[in-house]
Image (spheres, grey):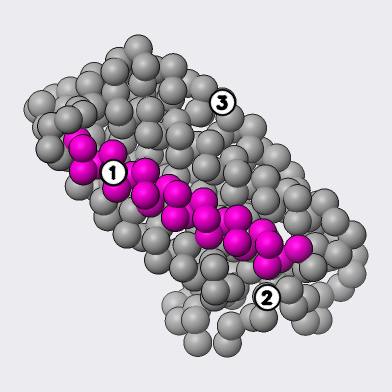
Amino acid sequence: MKPETGAPSRGLDPRRRGVLQRRIRWIVAITISYNVVEAIIALAAGTVATSAALIGFGLDSIVEVLSAAAIAWQFSAPDPEKRERVALRVIAFSFFGLAAYVSVDATLSLFGVREAVHSPVGIGLAMASLLVMPFLSWWERRTGTELGSVSAVADSKQTLICAYLSAALLIGLLLNTLLGWAWADSLAALFIAGFAVREGIEAWKGDTCAVPVAALTGERTVDPCD
């Protein structure tokens, strides 16, 4: 069953709620800090290597900061649930912006207007993000699920998309370096863009689901949107 936007989770002890809200703030702070560093490195490396893929990845990191900042703003209030819908709108727009940019950039790359070039810094950055982002996404989604926060779960999906983009970037850079296949990351990016559009629509509607922690950890399988 879908939780109503702004509805507090039932049966949660006030002390535990406070702990979870503070944890969300810490997760968001870490996410913002990492993405700021990631954006600076990616944009600098992309400019040096004339890599549209790296520049796009850096811009995606800026989108991630916007999404995380929306959650930080929400949970800075005494009653975060009252800011839930606005935070969801910001997250939805960030999804749509991400999808639009990735789609345009991937299309230009496929038609040979832009091509990813070899960048050791870019490869290292993509590998680091593949380690960091899935963990942050899991941590925020687990916490948001227990708290019953639709926006926190939505933001965790945004972070997970960053991990997918990291994988696409890494595969593209490696294939371009090893085999000269500059188009490989473009195809993966188009798939990610479609996923981002779907998640943006769900966030806009407030349909992002808070599923049981057991499902997130793989202990059991459920349909999270029942």
Element at label 1: helix
Tell me the quarter of the picture where residue 80 sits. Answer: bottom right
The relative height of residue 190 versus residue 43 in the rendered view (above or below) is below
Image position, residue 157 (x, y; %) = 50, 57
Q: CA distance from mark 3 to mark 1?
A: 25 Å
Identify the residue at horizontal 37%, vertical 49% (top origin). 100
| Residue 120 drawn in magenta | no
Disc 1 marks a residue whose amino acid type is Val
Residue behind mark 2: 5
Q: CA distance from mark 2 to mark 3?
A: 32 Å
Identify the residue at horizontal 28%, vertical 39% (top origin). 105
Q: Nearer the viewer, mark 2 or mark 3?
A: 2
Q: Nearer the viewer, residue 8 or 221?
A: 8
Residue behind mark 3: 37
Report whether 65 appears left or right of 171.
Answer: right
Report whether 168 appears left or right of 10.
Answer: left
Disc 2 marks a residue whose amino acid type is Thr
Image position, residue 4 (x, y; %) = 67, 81
Report whether 210 appears left or right of 147.
Answer: left
Q: Nearer the viewer, mark 3 or mark 1?
A: 1
Image position, residue 224 (x, y; %) = 50, 78
Tell me the quarter of the picture where residue 56 sits. Answer: top left
Residue behind mark 1: 104
Q: Nearer the viewer, residue 214 or 66?
A: 66
Q: Nearer the viewer, mark 1 or mark 2?
A: 1
Range drawn in magenta: 83-109
Q: Could you tell me what secondary structure mostly forms the magenta stretch? A: helix
Q: Nearer the viewer, residue 182 or 86?
A: 86
